Amino acid sequence: ITVGCENLGTQMVRLWVIDESGSFDFCDVLLVVQNNMGGCDNSTDGGNGAMILGNIYTEDNRMIEQVEVQAQGEQLQASIATGADGAYLFNVPMGSSISVTPFKDINHMNGVSTMDLIYLQKHVVNMQQLATPYLRIAADVNNDNQINALDLLVLRALILGEVERLDQNSSWRFVKNDYEFTSETPEAENFPESVDLDVNQEEMTVDFIGIKVGDLDLDGDASRSAGRSSKGLILSTTDKTMIPGFTYEMPVKINDMMSIEGFQFTLQVDAKRVAIRDVIIDNDVIDPSNFGWHSVHQGLLTMSWNTDEAETFANQTLFTLVVEATEVVKLSEVATINSQITSSEFYSEGNVEGQVSLQFLDTEFGESQFELLQNRPNPFIDKTNIRFILPQDMEANIAFFDVNGKVLKEIRGDFAKGRNSVRITTEELGVPGVVYYQLTAGDFQHIRKMIVQ
């Protein structure tokens, strides 16, 4: 293809592709012919050429790429995407009327986290107002010209992965850079998101300020990461060996004393081996709306929590996860916290402090006086002793299971404080090979395995 000065402007070109076997297809593309080096003088096309150009950037002067800028008029229908420099340029006929409109509606989650919920909630309760008109527009998440609790609900649903996009809003909004807001509620103003021009100059500049909806801490640029300290938020739970057909409660705690404004994460289990059944909440800090269940069938449970005033946690159970195993497996082998859907982060004093992680403990919190010991002898041929320790006189149950979770035998009784022992025979179990035995006493539950020869 050959182009010259007579082709300045946006041209439609049909692009064909043919493979070795002769199959072919085509698409229509827009070719923007520019006079950047001045090789064409103003006499080209009767001296009727002009340019509309500009940049698109955030309120803190970061250029925005992948913005589709459209130029429309009677003699022109053109579109161009901004690059890393945030710039666009159209060659247009002199004397024409052109409307310039930027648009970007991809990756709604970009730059959005529970940190933004903290800023939004503080604004809603009048604790700390959002500082600029652009931040207020970003805070109107559901695009109803108001900033209120509904925006919190919609934004949290996006963070938790309950929705993939904002149905009532685009991911970016744009305002002409020299527009002056005239009210204290800029989100309700009819601000210009496009500009109509009468082209009467050879070069006309129109810049726009881009606003990432939901991004209130201005970290929406993927190349610009939030600062983190070396601290981490460690959640703890008890490691358990689980057998099929039973549900297990997994209390999740913050052990260290920490002052926290918010946190978020994805809790992932191996969905082929464990299923998440429920979440139990026994405090007034966590709420069911803090959890996202959209992908729980894939073993992914998301969580996002925040408060307008920092909350101090110390050895406190946040929630109890209820899981069910489909095979014999240890909890630590199938559960973890990561950023699969909702990024693992926690916040304090208005900053991203670090990541959230999950730690597994060998004994129940505060139940170190309970203990289920390994049977002796093991392996055994005819009989073995099951030993366990109780903190007080109490009822206990010892259940025996095969590898498929079938109950082979149960021994229930009242046992004394301290060390206890019960005897089991191969005749009572009835099967050779691996057998699991589980002690249940009050809230304590632990499982071990033995080998019957």
Image (spheres, helix red, strand yellow):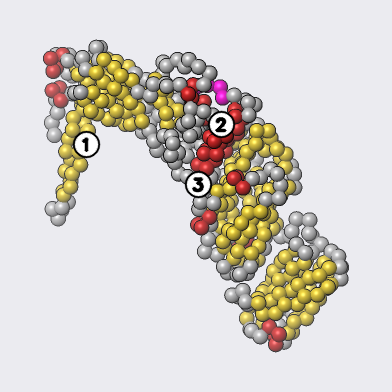
Identify the image quadrant of the C terminus: bottom right
Give the label on residue 29, or none: 1
Q: Name the N-terminal-most of marks 1 and 3.
A: 1
Q: Residues within 10 Å of mark 2 (few under 14, many from 20)?
A: some
Give the residue at the far top of this rendering. Answer: 200
The magenta segment: 130-135
Q: Is residue 155 left or right of residue 349?
A: left
Residue at point 49% right, 21% down? 186
Q: Is residue 30 left or right of residue 341?
A: left
Residue 426 spot, x, y in % from top left: 70, 85
State the image quarter where residue 424 is shown.
bottom right
Residue 239 or residue 78, whichever sits in front = 78
State the image quarter where residue 179 is shown.
top left
Three-letter code for the amino acid on which mark 1 is drawn: Val
- Under circle 2, the secondary element is loop
- Under circle 1, the secondary element is strand
Residue at point 59% right, 43% down? 304
State whether residue 446 is above or below residue 112: below
Disc 1, disc 2: CB below 8 Å?
A: no
- Under circle 3, the secondary element is loop
CA gap, disc 1 to disc 3? Answer: 36 Å
Residue 181 or residue 340, whichever sits in front = 181
Residue 399 spot, x, y in % from top left: 71, 74
**Residue at image mark 2:** 148
Residue 308 spot, x, y in % from top left: 65, 33
Nearer to us: label 1 or label 2: 2
CA gap, disc 1 to disc 2? Answer: 44 Å
Residue 72 spot, x, y in % from top left: 25, 25
Q: Name the N-terminal-most of marks 3 and 2.
A: 2
**Residue at image mark 3:** 162
| Res 171 seen here | no
